[in-house]
Amino acid sequence: MLETLLKERNLPALMTMKDGSPVTAENWCARRRELLDTLAREEYGVMPEKCGETTFREIRRDRIAAGVAVEHLVEVTFPTPDGASFTFPAAIRIPDIASAENPLPAFVYISFGFPKYDPNEELANEGVIIAEFVMNAVAHDGEDHYATLLSPHLFEDGKRPPDGTGKIGMWAFAASRLLDVLLTFDCVDPARIGVVGHSRLGKTALWAGANDERFTHVFSNDSGCSGAAITRKKIGETFPRIANVFPYWFCENMQTVSASIEASESTDFDQHFLLAACAPRKVYVASASEDDWADPTSEFLSCCAASPAWEILGLKGFVTPDRLPEPWDTLAEGNVGYHLRPGTHFLSRHDWIRYIRYIKQ
Ligand code: GTR
């Protein structure tokens, strides 16, 4: 059944190199590079360059989560291409049981700011570290003509080349700089580091994780259009609509790709390329059953379509019964994980608990 549903989407071939040769375990690295280059050029823009060492300074320390974890408020500073530097705040929350002898898994969490639900107690009790920063402290989530925060350090006089990064790329770049900091803590287990984001930040988590191989686990929550969801025949939000309403999330070239539904469905890529670019690392996609704007079915089918990237490497890809998922389904056996939560567009306790389980399994 799933094969038929996938065929209807008429996807560009993931497992064929640009020169027409088949993708194998031997040329997977080269194929991954092709996927990232295509997505950078056509959709998100080229990731900013890392220009030197990231540093940080602790501003404040508080005991949290009923007294079993410590929150370090820090300022993260990194050098920028214009010869200056950029600083943004972050919170690193470490359970007391973490130590060099007992290193714990960690999440870099790209957040909206004041979440309705924060999983600090669950994380502390389960022994997981979280490093969180707020997107608007790095790049303004609105049309600022690239004149505020990180943008002017990247583009002279706000002049962004056609493949210059959009805001998604800037937030993703900041996630990697926070990861630089996290990796200086000897109580962090570098073999279990996830990046997590919801919605527009789920798109960001995927782009961050696809690019930065130090992220061993990539979690996309309800990321929808230009996130996990396949674009071809997607319901809800479409490429033309997202590029029109949120042009600053993407590069200028995305405007051509999304000029019409026809244009967006005849590109040489689709969003399963983004999931596959995480291989051989783990990627996990979560959907919510009432989130038609994001389109759970297109998010799920993307996992099916990306799976061959792991399989060619001799790994378990996406393990699913041959049917569409039902609410409450969690498919976490393979290196591609998925769950369908009942309910609406949100990053909920249900989602976090499954991310914690997946990174610990
Ligand atoms: C919507 C947008 C979606 C999604 C969402 C969010 O307005 O159309 O792509 O990103 O915002 O980030 O909450």
Image (cartoon, rainbow, N blue to C red):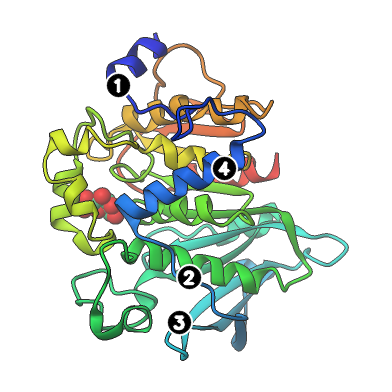
Q: Label 3 is placed on what type of residue?
A: Pro
User: Nearer the viewer's eye, disc 1 or disc 4?
Assistant: 4
Q: Residue at x 70, y 39 (%)?
A: 361
Name the residue beneath numbered marker 3.
81
Q: Quadrant of residue 235?
A: top left
196 up-or-down from 35: above or below: below
User: Nearer the viewer's eye, disc 3 or disc 4?
Assistant: 4
Name of the residue lying farthest toward the right? 101
Indicate if the residue with disc 2 has its beta carbon within 8 Å of ligand 1. no
Q: Which mark is residue 331?
A: none
Name the residue beneath numbered marker 1.
10
Name the residue beneath numbered marker 4.
30
From mark 3 to mark 4, how far is it between C-alphas?
27 Å
Q: Label 4 is placed on what type of residue?
A: Ala
Mark 1 or 4, nearer chain start: 1
User: Dot 4: few (<14), some (14–19), or many (≥20) neighbours within 10 Å?
Assistant: few
Q: Are marks 3 and 4 in contact (CB under 8 Å)?
A: no
From mark 1 to mark 4, how far is it between C-alphas?
24 Å
Q: Is residue 78 left or right of residue 140?
A: right
From mark 1 to mark 2, how far is it between C-alphas?
35 Å
